[in-house]
Amino acid sequence: FEVLKVVLCWSLEDASTDGKWCYTVFWVVGKPNTRLGLLKERLVEVCPTFASASAISFFYSSQIQSPRPPDVFLLKFCCYDQRGLLHDVTWVLSELELTIKKVKVSTTPDGKVMDLFFVTDSRELLHTKKRKDDTIDHLRSVIGDAMISCEIELVDSEVASCSQAAGFLPSIITEDMFQREMPLKPLDGLSTSENVSLTIDNLLSPAHTLVHICCQERKGLLYDIMRTLKDFNIQISYGRFSLRQRRSCEIDLFTMQADGKKIVDPSKQMALASRLESELNQPLRVAVVSRGPDTELLVANLVELSGKGRPLVFYDITFALKMLNTCIFSAEIGRRMIGDREWEVYRVLLDDREGEGLSVPQVKIEEEVWKTLMGWD
């Protein structure tokens, strides 16, 4: 579902499993630039192998070691600033299947930009000279003569772990940002919270707990539902997802706990329902705040218990700002604990080049970034 979130819109999906094999069918709508061959490769990579499926007890054994974390590389380049630069660079890295773990972008008084990207390579080839040269060439083809220098180097594990740390956030910003709801009304004059209906039923099936969801379709919907169930260690035996009129969707999931039993504990049901409603209503937090004379865009999303962050958030942020013709002065990505959950926090300091304030109202920036993240035109 993380792979499908990146490139496709879905209209109908069926999934079923016998506890050993899983059968999933998606009816999807691709974009003109969707690379179906690459999509197939990525789907095959995230699926368990035949050998592991044939020995499922061994696959889930505690003796299995966790996969080795991917190598982290530091991509640093200097160039002359230009409008939309950060999104253009982010687009190149996305096309090359390089995942951004952290970024540090700063602009000098003489109009130069120093960008530091901590990235991992889905192809696991960035340690080779050919892959490095290919990445630099792609960046140069987009940036052009504005590029001054570009280097890629492997960083050690200590630096890689430190690269995830987030900078200081004032407590008033964190409290306001992580407690409030987005005041948007994207469709039918209704807010997202008014469009969500969730029911947990133990009467319909003798062996499964039915989770029935009606909500508004958006980008990453299946991803948010599945990662939430994954965090609760809940398995799906059968699921059906269908897209209705006016972009509303209906989802039925026949689920069980890891021990094969139904979810009968009222406290577990309440915790699951509360988390799902929260994720369906507001999977991310978006806020535009004033820092004296400066304006900062803050975006945050929950980190999976597995440690994975949400895909392509930075890409969507930079795309929305480019469409608004709003420049970026500096940007950072890091992680921090808020309450009992880990969040990935994106901080983007917006650039007032004319010295007369931003040409786009803060509310407009907030709304457009939110809509882009949700996939709403």
Image (spheres, rainbow, N blue to C red):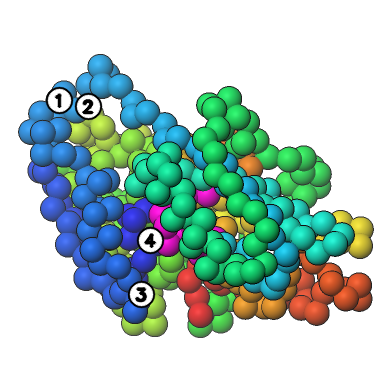
Res 60 label: 2
The residue singled out by tag 4 in the image is: 5
The residue singled out by tag 3 in the image is: 33
Q: CA distance from mark 3 to mark 4?
A: 15 Å
Q: Residue at x 60, y 37 (%)?
A: 164
Residue 227 drawn at (x, y percent) = 39, 46
Answer with the quarter of the image where residue 21 lies: top left
Q: Secondary structure at mark 2?
A: loop
Residue 1 drawn at (x, y percent) = 32, 55
| Extent of the magenta region | 90-101
Q: Is residue 288 magenta?
A: no
Residue 196 drawn at (x, y percent) = 45, 64
204 relative to 341, above or below: below
| Residue contact at pointers 1 and 2, CB within 8 angstroms | yes
Label 2 amino acid?
Tyr
Q: CA distance from mark 1 to mark 3?
A: 40 Å
Label 3 amino acid?
Asn
The mark nearer the N terminus, 1 or 3, is 3
Q: Between residues 280 and 336, which one lies in front from this camera angle?
A: 336
The residue singled out by tag 1 in the image is: 57
Q: CA distance from mark 1 to mark 2?
A: 5 Å
